[in-house]
Image (cartoon, rainbow, N blue to C red):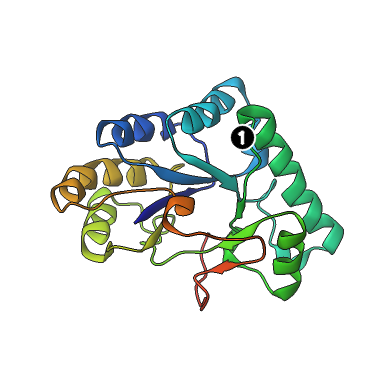
Amino acid sequence: MALTFDDGPGAHTGRLLDALKEYDAKATFFVVGRVACENEDNMALIKRMVDEGHEVANHSYSHFDFLKISDSAVLKQISKTNETIASITGKIPTLLRPPYGNFDNRVTQLAKQEGLAIVLWTPSPEDWRYKDVDYVCNFMLDYIEAGNTFLLHDVHKTTVDGVIKALPMLAERGLKLVTVSELFDLKPGDIHPASWGGGGE
């Protein structure tokens, strides 16, 4: 299954990477371009993600709702983030998670034009709303299963602490945590999951 983290990197991402490394777990980080290049520490975290076998993907440059901006603005949000990530890691992302999970056919075609598949999630504890370590941990243990794409946010201390608490128990269950691209072979313009009815951050 795939753990995915949105909106970072943040002050707690380093501890998360330490824990993932300890349990030989890989994750996909949907980073905000503006945050990625905000300072040297964040850029170092992005580079570390790739160096340690994680996947870095696109979550827009400024976290704007793509349904509320023009085609040219959406393309700028996507391309500027791709360029930012590539300048740090040497790799151009292949996956996009639209802010708030908001997209339509127009956004899908614009993403395809930029060589990106759209990745949503199944499921999420809405950790941006419920900032509680035990809640995040227990939700993961209750709802994580093979094939899931789990949404979390590494910018929240409670989320990172909850994940760190859950990791040894997930390892005991024999669940292998991999990147989205290791779990699914997605092509530009694809949408995962194909039947989407979510919403979130």
Identified at 75% across, 54% down, the residue is 114
Residue 188, x across and y down, in percent: 66, 60
Numbered disc 1: secondary structure:
helix
Identified at 27% across, 49% down, the residue is 176
Identified at 45% across, 39% down, the residue is 54
Residue 105, image quadrant:
bottom right
Residue 70, x across and y down, in percent: 84, 63
Answer with left or right where residue 169 lies relative to residue 62: left
* Disc 1 crowd, CA 10 A, few/some/many (<14, 14-19, 20+): many
Residue 39 seen: yes
Q: Amino acid at mark 1?
A: Ala
Which residue does the numbered mark 1 point to in the structure image? Answer: 36
Q: Residue furthest left?
A: 172
Most foreground residue, 53 or 106? 53
Q: Residue furthest top?
A: 40
Indicate the quadrant containing the N terminus: top left, top right, bottom left or bottom right: bottom left
Residue 16, x across and y down, in percent: 36, 35
The number of discs equals 1
Residue 49, x across and y down, in percent: 47, 33
